[in-house]
Every structure is written in structure tokens, then in C-alpha cells.
Amino acid sequence: MAVPAFSDVFHAATGHAPREYQARLAARLVTGDVPTTLDVPTGTGKTAAALVGWLYALAADAASARTQQRPRKVALRLHVATVRRVIVDDTARCAEELAELVNAATTGALAEMAASLRNGLSLEPREPVLEVRRLRGGLGPENGPTEHTRYPSRPAIVVGTLDMLCSRLLFRGYQLPPRRRSIDAALTGADSWWVLDEAHLASQAQATLDVLRTHESALEGRFSGTVPGLQVMAMTATPGSSAPASAAAAAGHDVLTWDAGEEERRDPGLARRRAARAAVPVTLRAEKGSSADGLADAARQLVPSLTTGQSVVVFCTTVATAKKVRTTLGRTLGTAAPDKKTRTAPSTSHAEHDVDLELLIGGMPERLTGQVTERLAPYRTGSRRREQAPPTVIVATSTLEVGADLDLTHLVTEACSADSLIQRLGRVNRVGAREDGSVTIVHTPGKPDPVHGAAAEAVIDAIKDAGTLGEVATLLRQAPDPAALRRPQQVPTLLPPSVLAAYLRTAGSRNDPPVAPWIHEIADPRAEVTVVVRHGVALMDKPEGEALLEDLELAPPDLRAEGWTIRLADLPDLVGELGTSPFVLLDPASSSPRVLHGTQDARFVTSGSVVVIDANAAPKALGVGSTDKKLDLSQRHLLPQATLEEVSMRLEQLARRAGSEVTGPTTAASPSVVLADLAGQAGRLPDHSTAVEQARAEVLPELADELKTPPGWLLETEVLGKSLDHPWLRISLIRPPEKEPRPRAVALAGHNEAVGALAERWARAIGLPPEVVEDVALAGRWHDEGKGASESFQAALAMREDMDGWLVPADSQPTRPLAKSALPRRLWRRSTRLAGVPDAWRHEAASTRLLDVAIQAGRATPHDADLVRHLILTHHGFFRGPGPVYPDSGTRSGAGPVAHEPYQDPGSTRWRRQVTAVHRLSARYGPYSLALAEAVLRLADWEVSRREQSDTAAHAAPRHDTQDPSASRREQADDR
């Protein structure tokens, strides 16, 4: 099947013709020739080049490989790894838009490309040809699942942070249970192309990827080369050396860059846009005082000229400087007006100039960062909402340097290293679409920069004669000593083969080396604490609010969503800004919260502690302005002295607000909580002299019964401080649980056959050799056979739940062995115990024992018996290394397994051989190739199990919608 021209595909996907370098990259990718570096200017479509170029290359290569009966050269999975979460979200958004276009296309170039993918990769008729996964920390259930693809033969774009992706590549995936690790290692390490975005900020990760790409790939058999190996391309507008691309190529780096003359010939408007951007005026401002004063003054001078859709970004080197600049601007721009309805801290609208003031710094709470990023959305490159956006001043640290696709009007920045300056300049008139804008660089001669050191002053010296942005770029590129313009970097450490070998035993050991040193530079281990803002901290220091401390103890703050991270050394300054307001210490080593006062008590705070401060004192203490009142991000609502009517009204408001923010009963984030003492119910609560039997703690639940429950919700109440004179009521607004689905019982023979068939189809579509395909299929047909080897296990599967909720034996035993029970998952463990199934017994071991018998009898003829045994033993994630031990299995009869399980008996030679199998097979096939075979079987088992429980079990197509965020946990617990 013919693949359309790349220019047609790119135009259909993006709405414009490809640049020359984008077409050149796609042509190279079609042949499997991946450059080591893509070095093009900012704002010229690097992300689109990688996403569309890879998918087009895969379609062309898959079609050609099928016709020529050869292995593919282009990887099935594209991983885009980056250092910043905001880049992850932006790139994932682009990838999702591409997937929607391709999957929905019925005519035109995209539909033709989709047909080529479907035919070349043997995808099912209703199966999407592309899916997108997003892997980063800080994602709750409302954002969809944080997991890799479950379809190993389907093209996928996976966008994630370095931590989430690189840890998976090293068999130690963050946020993954140990038994899931090998699956994600396979999906990231085999048949995979990695794009390392902003590579100049990830030298350690790049070194690790290079080791795996070169040295480790040499050890990978990749099933006789039938599966593409790991390939890596660094992508940056700020390469590690300021030398031209030709010099980098001469040094041995395969750099793909652009030809400015050719690009401008193909796009006449490009020359005009580049000229407009290069002409942005640049001013160097020497400041005798503090840099914070100079930055604030430079920004303040720009504010009167700002109109709708215009902005100023102020880049600061340190968090302390950013906070000081923000506070100064908030105080001097004019009298602060109340926040607009759609704004939350730390955004302030200033009446005199009608300017929004934003703060975006490292260490901010995830929830707050998301709010700021959303408010800045109109200033994204190409946004149609720019013309209606309010004029905005953004005070930021390096957290905004990278990846935030913002196109701002004016830049004010502290002097910094060349790398940082290039990134910061990339936020001004990003694509040359406007004629306005300016750059002001503030430096303090004779005062060393605390972060960039001598490089900051060296940059100022190098560009002192520049008057425009274009001249700055030229002078930096032609600097005689590029190294002097950059901060010294730690020399990357190389991953030793022995460490990778230790990671292959995915169950892990407390003696395993951590993976962090292979992903990031070894950081300065400065102690940090987390600051959380809550209303009512001042009240906790009084008898009438002491019960609120119990809420902090029973429901600790969500540090990801609420926490501000600061250095322990900076804590005394923060406490000093609190004045007379107390603070609460949540010490990991202590059993209960403590109320503390003043800087003299700051000595009790240790590294890793959580400090809770009052919302009224927080703006000044955190340095985010004096008018911000919405820093409490806890979803808790404090109502002292409230009446039942007032509490009911607040609950109704919260329910109404939650209903407008979520799309279904399972997408809500943490529940809203109301804390009330109901002291406003005069005469209903006993005073402190009342007899014990009429204590306030006993009356509060009775009053709670009178609260009005919003329709479609449930109220969960709890009394805080029951033994105190002034207890409080905690009222949680929760959604009712969904109706529990009733599972179907599944026959063992049909399940085994279905898993074998799907695993075989996937393995063949991926391109594995015929003998490996047959072995994977054989493992699928035998993987659960051991479930039929135990009468007690079959009895557990056949149990039913009676009308009173009791588990009772089946009225009659099934005529055929079962693979799946009709009981809900919550009852599985109870049913196995009632049936007498020993806790340590594993059906995988029994299945492998039965396979051995079949091999000896000639009923099973694997090509590699060791591989088939390993695939069966590991299909629930156990036995990758020592498996569960059950040496007394042969002493049981009737209630237990029917035979001795040699693969669970350390006294058996088969157990000892199995312990070393993962290393033996990794040496034979390669660690990622072996893991890929495991992943094919395990994911086929998951998919067949899903289809068996769907309404159209026999004909269910692979899922196209978002994956169930709890499914991974369920399948990890599915030991049946």
C-alpha cells in the first residue's frame, strides 16, 4: 500500500507545509537513520518535526517491510523525555491532537497513512493506529492514568519526565509496583526511539541513554535483529557547545540542523519574521544596588505602555530575588484591587494600570503552578486568545526558562550564563509575529552571581556591544571561549554493566544502587522543608481550635498539591515574617502536631518536616504579595461559629462547584471537607459545665444528622477532639460508590487458548522470529494451566456469594476447570482461604510443572524450553529472580495443591535453575528483548481478561479510550 508524500501528511496534520529540515529529518527516519542531535532555532517546529516525522517514517517503513518481508527499521514507540513537567504537558497536547486527527481521518493523506500503519502492523479494523501516554508526577485520577501503553504492537507516543521514563528504562520505574517493572522496561528499551528534549539540561540522562544505545545494544540479540533497538536523538535550541553545527559534526556528532537560506526561500515570510525577532532592542543595565531593585524598576518602567495582549517576563536567578521583585512590584504598581473571579493566588490585578501580576518559581505547589500556567495560556505561541488577554507581568525563576511555549512581549532578566540567556531570549517575540518588544539585561558589576558565577559576567562582557537580539545571538555563537560563558557542569557518570544486571531482578533488594545518579547530576544535599498554608492555624493555638490539630494528624496535607519547598536554612526568615502568628510542626519523627512560635522555635524543625502556617500570614512570609488570600489549597473550608443552615449552604455550594468541574462520578479529585464547630447553634450545644453524658462531642453527631445532603452526594462525618472541651466536626463531601460490576466466570481452556492466540498475533505483528512467536504462543496456552491442578483452588473459583453476603461453595462443581471466578475482586482472597489454598502457592509454578510433564511426553515441543518456562513463571511478575517459596507443598492433600511444586521448593534443582534464569536468558537474548517477550504475554493476558468481562466479550475491540486508572493496581493484585 502506497504511503502519501510527507509534505501532504505534514500539511494535513499541522495546516502548513513542512520546513526543509523537517522533510530532511523524515527522509532520514524512513531509512532508520536517526541523527544524534537535532539543532534548530527556537520556535521553528522541533516538536512537530519529531512527532509527525516519526509517525510518517513508521508508516512508510512498516509498509515496505511487509512488502519486502524484512524486519522494520523504525521503532514502534516514540518516547519524548524532558526535564520539565510543563514541557510534558505541552508536548502531550500536541501528540494528542495528532492522534485525534490520524485516528479519525477517513479521507486524505492522514487516512492513507493510517491505512498503511494498519496494514503494515496488522492492527485490528477498529483499533486506533496511534495512542498517546503521558508519564509525569503530580497527575491525579482526574488527569487520566499515569501508565505506559498496554498494546505492544500498536504505535504509541509516550511523553514524560526524565525521572518517569529513565527509571522505567532501568527496570526501576517510579510509581510502579515491582512486578510491573519489566513490562515498562521492555516498552521503553526495545523497539523504541527516544527524543531527549532540552538535552543541554540533561547531560547525565543523555550519558546513560548513550551507554544503553551503544554498549548495551551490542549485547542485545533483539531476536536476530528482527526488532529495532534503542535509538536516541537529542533535541535542543541550545546545544552543549556554542560551536557551529559543522564543528560539532567534525567532532563526530551527527547533527541535523537547518539551512537558513533554504528555509527562507521555501517560506518567504520566514525572513521577515526572523528579521523582526532579530531586531528586538537589547539594553544592558548596570545596577549599583541590588539586582532585585534593578529588575523591579526596569519592569515598572514598561508597565505604563502595556496594552491588551502584551506582557513582561522578569527572570530572576534565585527564588529569594523573585519573591522580592514580586513584592516590590505588587507594592508599587498601584493599589491592589480585589482578585477577579477567575483568579487565584498568586495573581493580582492592579487597579492603577489594570495589570495582572504572576509569580512562577521552583518549589511552588503543583496545584498553584497549574493555576498560573492555565492563566498564562492566552500567551502561548499562536493562541487566538492573546488579543483579549489582560496585560500581564510574570516574575519567574529558571522554571520558566525551558519548554513553556510562551510568546511574551518584553523580557527583563538578571545576567546569567549563555545557556540560560538563550532560553530566556526564546520567550520574547518567539516566532517573529510582532514588531514590538524589548530585552533588558540587569547586571551588578563586581558582585558574583550566586548561581551562574563568573559565566554571568563573561556573557555581559561578550555582548556589551550588542544592541539587538540578533546581535546578542551572533556574539554568543562567535565567542572565542564558549566554555567561559557556561556554568561548569558535573562530568556525567557512566552506568556500569554490573549495576544494570542487578536491576534485572525487578523484585529488587535494599542493597540495589538507586537509579537517580544515572538520571540527574548528583545534587547538593541541602536540607529542605515543606511549607503548607491553611486557614485557622492561629485558631489552633487557642482552646476553641485545638481540635483542628487532629485533622492535620488524621489527614496529612497533600504535599504535592499544597506544599512550598524551601531550604531549611531559609526557614528562620520565613518564621520571622510570620510575626506573632504561630506555626504547626508536622515532624516525621513525632506522633502528633506541635504548635510553635517565633524564630526561637525554628530550631525544632528538621529536614523533611512539614510546617503549616496561617493563610493570613502566608503572603508576606512566602513573599508572594500582601493581597493574596487564596493560598490555602487544601480543599478544606473552615466555618467557626457556624449554624447548621450556614454549613448546609456551604456544602451545597461545594457540591455545585464540583459538579461543574468534573465530567463523571469517578473523575473528582480529593473530596471537599468542611470543618465546623457548630457553635452558632445557640442552645443546642451544652456548655463546658454540663454533665459528662451531655458532652458536646456526643451532641455534634446528632446535629450533623440534620445537615442537608446535596443531591447525588454523601456526607461522611467525624468528630475531632472528642476529649476536648471544644470539639469540631469534620464533614467530607463524597460521591456515592459506583455499582460494583459482577464478573463472569471464565473457563480455563478457552482463556488459555485466547491468550495464546492474542500473544501470537502481537508477537508476529511486532516482527519476532517464527520460532519465538511459537514459543510465546505456547506459553500463553499453558500460562494458567496450573489453576486446574488444585482442587482447592478450583473450589475457591467456583464459590458464590449468598443473599446475606456469605461465601458458600458452589451448588455443583463446574464441568470444566475455571480460569476466572464470578466473585468480585474484594472477595478473592477470602475465597481462597476458605477453600484452603495455601497463601504461598502459585499457579504459575504448577503450570510450569505441568509443561515439563507435557514436554517429556511429547505433547509440547518448544523451540526454547527455558524461555517458555520463564514466560509462564513470570506472567504475574513473580519469579524474575527467586520466586515465592512453598517447600512443603508436597505434604498436603485434598485441601492443597495436588502435587509437589518444584519451582517453589529451594531443595529442588528446578527451583535453583529458575533463580538464575533471568540472567541466563538475558545473556542469550538481551535484557530488553527478554522483557519484551514477557510483556507481550502479560499484556495479552490482561487484554483477554478485559475482553472476557466486557459486554461484547467475544468481539471486543482493543480500547481506544483512556485506560482505567485503577486497572494497573487491580491487575497487579490479580493472582487468580
Image (cartoon, rainbow, N blue to C red):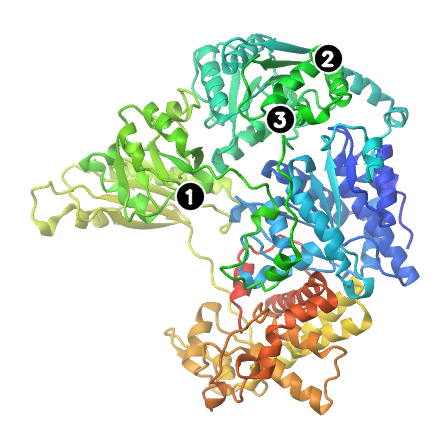
Mark 1: which secondary structure?
loop
Say few, some or many: other residues with alpha carbon within 10 Å of mark 3 (under 14 / 14 to 19 / 20 or more).
Answer: many
The label number, if any, that marks residue 468 in the structure image: 2
Please, what is the three-letter code of the amino acid marked with disc 3?
A: Pro
Sequence order check: which comes first, mark 3 or mark 2?
A: 3
Query: Residue 385: image x %, image y %?
Result: 64, 25
Q: Is residue 318 left or right of residue 712?
A: right
Query: Residue 694: image x %, image y %?
Result: 11, 49
Which of labels 2 and 1 is toward the front? 2
Sequence order check: which comes first, mark 2 or mark 1?
A: 2
Query: Residue 274: image x %, image y %?
Result: 79, 20
The label number, if any, that marks residue 558 in the structure image: 1
Mark 3: which secondary structure?
helix
Q: Is residue 494 left or right of residue 304?
A: right
Which of labels 3 and 2 is toward the front? 2
Which of labels 3 and 1 is toward the front? 1
Judge whether residue 149 can be spotted in this image.
no
Say few, some or many: other residues with alpha carbon within 10 Å of mark 2 (under 14 / 14 to 19 / 20 or more).
Answer: some
Position above or below: 704 against 314: below
Residue position marked by numbered label 3 in the rendering? 378
The residues bearing labels 3 and 1 have C-alpha atoms spaced at a distance of: 29 Å
For the N terminus, the quadrant is bottom right
Nearest to the observer: residue 711 or residue 723 = 723
Q: Quadrant of residue 586?
A: top left
Nearest to the observer: residue 257 or residue 657 = 257
Nearest to the observer: residue 238 or residue 373 = 238
Q: Are marks 3 and 2 in contact (CB under 8 Å)?
A: no
Please, what is the three-letter code of the amino acid marked with disc 1?
A: Asp
